């Protein structure tokens, strides 16, 4: 089932050439990066790293929203280390991911509630749900 957006809040626009060994620039000029294939000696980043960074940032925002709703103050050291694997199976190339969430000083039961709530509201989590394997760990 495809979910339709009622109101667009922001549109990120990029222009990419050369694929995994090319470059990408955003329409506002704030992003200008070289790309290289994972594991290569190229000077650039790769789509898996970019996806991991975007998901981590979004997930932290979703944790913040959940914490605000629960009246919980988050630690300044809150961090999400996201790992995105590129692999293969009979269906071709596939992704899988692990989000390793650090919420120091938060009771583990409350921390689990926060990450579960974030996983329900984060747009990246919604986009991947049912499409790739995702594990969320409290570290």
Image: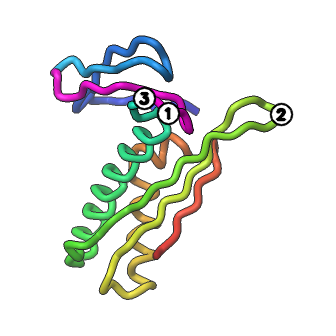
Left or right: 24 as drawn, with respect to 49: left
- Magenta range is 29-42
**For marks 3 and 2 on the same chain, the one whose residue lies earlier in the sequence:** 3
User: Of the numbered discs in the image, which one, if any, rests on residue 4?
Assistant: 3
Q: Nearer the viewer, residue 112 or 38?
A: 38
Q: Residue 70 appears in which quarter of the rendering? A: bottom left
Q: Element at badge 3?
A: loop
For label 1, the residue is 41
For label 2, the residue is 90
* Few, some or many residues within 10 Å of mark 2 (<14, 14–19, 20+): few
CA–CA distance in space, label 2 to label 1: 28 Å
Q: Number of labelled discs? A: 3
**For marks 2 and 1 on the same chain, the one whose residue lies earlier in the sequence:** 1
- Residue 120 painted magenta: no
- Residue 15: image x %, image y %? 33, 14
Q: Residue 68 appears in which quarter of the rendering? A: bottom left
Quadrant of the image for the N terminus?
top right
- Residue 39 painted magenta: yes
Identify which residue is drawn at 43% across, 74% down.
113
Q: Residue furthest top?
A: 17
Left or right: 39 as drawn, with respect to 76: right
Q: Which is in the foreground here, disc 3 or disc 1?
A: 1
- Residue 133: image x %, image y %? 64, 51
């Amino acid at each position: 089932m495809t979910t339709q957006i009622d109101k667009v809040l922001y549109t990120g626009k990029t222009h990419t050439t050369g694929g995994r060994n090319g470059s990408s620039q955003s329409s506002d000029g704030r992003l200008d990066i070289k790309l290289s294939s994972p594991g290569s000696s190229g000077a650039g980043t790769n789509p898996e790293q970019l996806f991991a960074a975007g998901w981590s940032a979004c997930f932290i925002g979703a944790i913040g929203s959940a914490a605000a709703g629960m009246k919980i103050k988050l630690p300044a050291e809150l961090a999400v280390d996201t790992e995105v694997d590129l692999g293969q199976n009979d269906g071709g190339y596939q992704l899988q991911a692990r989000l390793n969430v650090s919420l120091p000083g938060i009771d583990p039961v409350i921390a689990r509630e926060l990450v579960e709530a974030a996983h329900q509201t984060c747009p990246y989590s919604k986009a991947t749900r049912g499409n790739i394997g995702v594990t969320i760990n409290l570290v």
